[in-house]
Each structure stands twice: as C-alpha cells, then as structure tokens.
Image: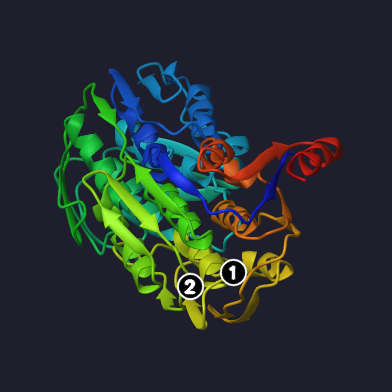
C-alpha cells in the first residue's frame, strides 16, 4: 500500500497550476455518450475516478481515445449494453451519471447502486423521483437500478432537497425528453453550470443553470462538440488552505475566483491576505491565524468538500472555532486522526468545537476519505516532525500528482510503498 511521508515545518511558497474539476468532468464524460458523433473533452484531470469511469464506459461499448493525459475523444455510437457493472460503481459513485445519460439517449439504463467515499448516507431518491416524473419506470432489483421508458416526457419537478447529483442526472435525461421540463430547488454548483454548458454545446436547450430554476426544452438529437472543463475549485481551495496552515505564500493559477468566494472570505476572516487576479488567487499567511465559525452549505455557501481543510487550519489558529457540518454526517472522521497529532477538538452531533493549538506533532495517520486525506497531508506539512499518511488511494481519486505539486511549493513529501523507503526518506531529511 502506498503512503505519503512528510517532513513538515516549512512554509509552502510559489505557484501551483490547478487542473480540471473532477466533479464536473465525471458528469460531462457520462453526458458525452448522448450523441452518436465524436466529442472531444480537454482539461480533464488525470485521477483515478476519471480513469475508472472511462473504463466503465468502454465496458458498455463506447469508443474512448486518450489523445493525451488531459484530453479524450469519446464516441457513443457503438454502445450496445445499457448495464453498468457493480465493479465500477463500488469504486466511484459518479458512475450513476450514466443512468441519466443512457436513459436520455436510449430510454433505458441499468446501473448498480452506488459506492464512493465513506462520508455518510447519500440517498439517490431524488434521482429516481426525477426519472419517474419524466415518465420512466424505475425499479431496484438485485442491487441494481433499472430505469426504462417508452418515451420521456417533459415535466415540472420540485426537488425535496438540493442535490447536485440529482440535478445533473435529471437534467441529462430531460435534455432529450419530449417537451419542456422545469426543475426547481436545484443545485447551483459551478459543475452543474458546466454540465449544462457542455450539453448546450452539443445542441441541448438548457436555461437557468446556476439559478434556482432550470428550464430544459428537449431536443431529438445531440451533436459533436469540443469542450474544456472548468478548473477545480476544491483543488484550488486545498492549496489555499495549505498556504494558510503552513504560514506560506501560494498563488493558485488557472482558477475562476468567483467560484472561490466562500473560501476566500473565510481565509480573510482568519487573517490571511488574499489577492484576486483574472484567473489566479494569491494567499499569504505571515502570522498565526485567528479562529472563526463556519457552516457548510450548498453553493454558494462554504463547500462541505473544503471542511476538513479549514478544520486543520482552524486547529492551528488562535482561539475557539466551531464548524457545523450540514451536508454529510460522517465528515468529521478525520478529527480523530488530527487529535493524534495534538489537535484539541470536541465533536457533538454535527458540530465540532476546536481549541487552536500552537503546533501539531508528527504522527502516523490514516486518510478516511478523499478530502480528509488531503487535509491530513496539510496537517503533516504544518508540523515540525515526520508524518505518515496511510490509505492515500483516497487522495489519488481526486488530486492529480498531489505530492509533485506540493514538492513544487517546497514541501518535503514523498510517495512511498515500503518500510525501506520510509527509512531512506528519514535519513535524507535528517
């Protein structure tokens, strides 16, 4: 099993290039099979989740051509199978986007119930409610979701809860339904907007993505397109908090500052200097930061995917901070690991009270999920000692070349796979 070994204690300084948004890319790849023509997608992050989804798509007959590391050509005209294997689904939850894509194009789909990161229950009832409203019959049998319709018909649907996955999945299916679909109480995340823009570039007629109401007039067919995925706001935010926690000075390049407003505002509240440019943001932390309160909310609120990163930073800040997690109930599992490094934290229900400490001490910790794993790496970089992070397979699901990008900012971090390599690193860093 691979691990990260980290010798912390130095500020991270320099520039880092942010890749394409994983969450946008997963949905856009699925949507690409909705035309029989060839679609080219670039600014694709080279991470495990993306590669697994491409394999799943090849498994049902789609033609996938990797042009280079960040570009892929997809042709869905050869799809002959509408059933997505459980092996793919258990690895990545986002395979369920193939439900909306296949149902929209072929009026039929069969996908195993999803897996993914272990951060709490993420029911898919809103997806199924949407498909049924469009006229599909949806059954769950033998651990699979079976959806089928003679024809999909436009509908007026109000989601009971704001769900990114359901918004995207139902929007894809509705793009090729007969007539007008109106979706209310939808998710407004940047990747929802990106998927709508991608579908529109293929000839769909979707208006209102990014607002509370999305209107979709179904079209009979979609056509080829070339599309570039938006930058990853969560990767960007992770490096911004890495600057804050290590008292560093990092400029994140290739970002859309508008998508980072909630993160920027918290960093400023804590005492960081933040400079915004057209497509870059610079974060400078030259003193110990101060405490604040944060509550995770759907976009444009503070993202749940940034909660562990701010948690680590607040655990080193002066005073008492409170984090309220309103999206996923298991998002605090990293705090037990952080306590091993000397953090002082008390969790009650969906709230964590954090008493800031001057510094952490190095320890061996384990990544419980993707974002928590990245946060524990930041914690390791902010401590004087040696930290080993186990289970980094989670981190590799969503961060491309994480250790290399950190090395470029002056971090002493290496990916290792044996006790011998760990000893070698320790000798090297003294």
Q: How far across and down, in percent of the image, does residue 300 sit?
A: 29, 63
- Quadrant position of the N terminus in the picture: top right
Instruction: Using the rendered view, name the quadrant where residue 73 is placed.
Output: top left
Q: Residues within 10 Å of mark 1 (few under 14, many from 20)?
A: many
Instruction: Give me the residue at 27% from left, 60% from top.
Output: 186
Looking at the image, which is closer to me, 77 or 319? Answer: 319
Residue 267 is tagged as: none
Q: Is residue 318 visible in this depiction of the protein?
A: yes
Looking at the image, which is closer to me, 247 or 162? Answer: 247
Looking at the image, which is closer to me, 19 or 42? Answer: 19
| Comes first in the chain, label 1 or label 2 | 2
Q: How far across and down, in percent of the image, does residue 288 sit?
A: 49, 71
- Alpha carbon separation for disc pair 1 and 2: 8 Å
Instruction: Using the rendered view, name the quadrant where residue 392 is placed.
Output: top right
Helix, strand or loop status at disc 2: loop
Above/below status of 364 relative to 89: below
- What residue did someone put label 2 on? 325
Residue 332 is tagged as: 1
Q: How far across and down, in percent of the image, does residue 65 sit?
A: 43, 15
Q: How far across and down, in percent of the image, does residue 410 sit?
A: 55, 43
Above/below status of 46 relative to 329: above
Q: Residues within 10 Å of mark 2 (few under 14, many from 20)?
A: many
| Pointers 1 and 2 in contact (C-beta within 8 Å) | yes
Helix, strand or loop status at disc 1: loop
| Number of numbered tags placed on the structure image | 2
Above/below status of 244 relative to 146: below
Q: Is residue 135 visible in this depiction of the protein?
A: no
Apparent side of residue 207 relative to residue 343 in the rendered image (left or right): left
Instruction: Give me the residue at 28% from left, 24% from top.
Output: 35
Scheme of colours in the image? rainbow
Instruction: Give me the residue at 58% from left, 34% from top.
Output: 85
């Amino acid at each position: 099993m691979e691990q990260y070994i980290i010798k912390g204690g130095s500020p991270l300084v320099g520039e880092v290039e942010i890749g394409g948004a994983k969450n946008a890319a997963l949905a856009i790849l699925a949507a690409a099979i909705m035309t029989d023509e060839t679609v080219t997608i670039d600014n694709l992050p080279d991470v495990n989740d993306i590669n697994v989804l491409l394999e799943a798509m090849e498994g049902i007959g789609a033609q996938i051509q990797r042009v280079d590391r960040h570009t892929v050509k997809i042709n869905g005209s050869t799809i002959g199978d509408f059933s997505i294997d459980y092996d793919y689904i258990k690895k990545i939850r986002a395979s369920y986007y193939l439900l909306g894509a296949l149902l929209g194009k072929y009026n039929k789909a069969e996908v195993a119930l999803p897996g993914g990161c272990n951060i709490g229950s993420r029911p898919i009832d809103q997806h199924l409610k949407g498909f049924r409203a469009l006229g599909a019959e949806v059954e769950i049998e033998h651990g699979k979701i079976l959806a089928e319709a003679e024809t999909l018909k436009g509908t007026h649907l109000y989601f009971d809860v704001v769900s990114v996955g359901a918004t995207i999945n139902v929007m894809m299916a509705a793009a090729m339904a007969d007539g007008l679909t109106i979706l209310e109480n939808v998710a407004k995340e940047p990747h929802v907007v990106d998927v709508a823009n991608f579908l529109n570039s293929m000839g769909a007629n979707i208006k209102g993505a990014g607002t509370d109401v999305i209107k979709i007039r179904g079209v009979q067919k979609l056509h080829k397109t070339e599309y570039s995925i938006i930058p990853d706001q969560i990767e960007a935010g992770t490096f911004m908090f890495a600057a804050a926690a290590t008292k560093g000075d990092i400029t994140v390049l290739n970002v859309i500052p508008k998508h980072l407003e909630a993160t920027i505002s918290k960093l400023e509240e804590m005492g960081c200097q933040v400079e915004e440019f057209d497509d870059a943001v610079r974060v400078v932390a030259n003193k110990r930061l101060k405490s604040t309160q944060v509550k995770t909310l759907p976009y444009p609120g503070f993202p749940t995917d940034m909660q562990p990163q701010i948690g680590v930073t607040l655990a080193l800040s002066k005073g008492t901070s409170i984090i309220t997690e309103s999206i996923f109930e298991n998002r605090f599992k990293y705090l037990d690991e952080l306590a091993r490094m000397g953090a002082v934290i008390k969790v009650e229900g969906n709230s964590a009270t954090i008493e800031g400490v001057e510094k952490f001490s190095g320890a061996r910790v384990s990544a419980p999920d993707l974002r928590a794993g990245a946060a524990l790496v930041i914690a390791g970089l902010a401590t004087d000692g040696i930290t080993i992070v186990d289970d980094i397979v989670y981190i590799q699901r969503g961060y491309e070349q994480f250790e290399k990008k950190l090395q470029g900012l002056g971090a002493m971090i290496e990916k290792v796979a044996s006790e011998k390599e760990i000893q070698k690193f320790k000798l090297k860093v003294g």
